[in-house]
Structures are given as structure tokens and as C-alpha cells.
Image (tube, rainbow, N blue to C red):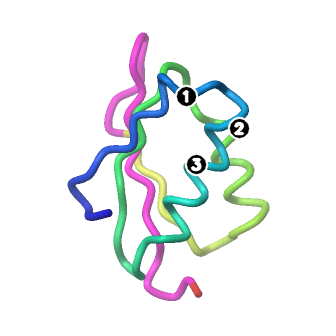
């Protein structure tokens, strides 16, 4: 997945969303990112990333609702 690719999870059932997002993130090369598209603020996902991968990810809101949220999620150059 490249920096310009989107991961739209709105059509996935909620229990599949986090695993799909983490799988996509783990597949990134260092310094790469993707854009998450969601139907709600993915703040709980941010907290999960922060707990499991502190300092290894980037998180930048590109759009903040009210119907669509877009967040660029990246892997830092120092992430394993």
C-alpha cells in the first residue's frame, strides 16, 4: 500500500475493522502511510496504536466528520 492508497473500512463489520487496519499498517514499509476512511472518529483505534506501538506510528486527521473521517496513518522510519 502506498501513501496515496485509501483503506475504507465503512463496509466492514465492526469486529473486522481493527484487525484489517493493523494488518495494513504492519505491511507498510518504514516511512510509508495509508489513509483510513471511517464512519466515526477512530479515536479508540489511536489509543490502541499508542498502547501497542508507541512512537512507531503517525496519525494525522485529514477530515473530521460529521459523516466521514479520514486519517493518514503511517509507520515511522524507526518502526520495526
User: Measured from the top left, where is residue 80 in percent x and y?
Assistant: 59, 87
CA distance separating discs 1 and 2: 17 Å
The secondary element bearing badge 2 is classed as: helix
Q: Work out whether 50 lies above or below 7.
A: below
The secondary element bearing badge 1 is classed as: loop
**In the displayed structure image, the side of residue 59 where residue 44 appears, left or right:** right
Q: Residue at 42% of width from left, 42% of height from top?
A: 36
Residue 23 included in the magenta stretch of the image: no
User: Measured from the top left, where is residue 17 in percent x and y?
Assistant: 61, 38
Residue position for label 2? 44
Tell which of 47 and 6 is nearer to you: 6
Q: Residue at 48% of width from left, 23% of height from top?
A: 11
Labelled disc at residue 12: 1
Q: Work out whether 19 lies above or below 67.
A: below
Range of magenta residues: 62-79
Q: Residues within 10 Å of mark 3 (few under 14, many from 20)?
A: some
Q: Work out whether 38 lies above or below 62.
A: above
Check the image and name the residue furthest to the left: 4
Q: Residue at 58% of width from left, 74% of height from top?
A: 56
Residue position for label 3? 20
Amino acid at each position: 500500500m502506498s501513501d496515496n492508497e485509501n483503506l475504507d473500512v465503512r463496509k466492514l463489520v465492526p469486529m473486522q475493522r481493527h484487525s484489517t487496519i493493523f494488518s495494513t499498517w504492519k505491511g507498510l514499509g518504514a516511512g510509508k502511510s495509508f489513509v483510513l476512511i471511517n464512519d466515526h472518529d477512530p479515536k479508540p483505534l489511536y489509543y490502541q496504536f499508542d498502547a501497542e506501538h508507541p512512537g512507531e506510528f503517525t496519525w494525522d486527521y485529514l477530515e473530521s466528520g460529521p459523516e466521514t473521517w479520514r486519517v493518514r496513518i503511517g509507520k515511522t522510519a524507526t518502526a520495526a
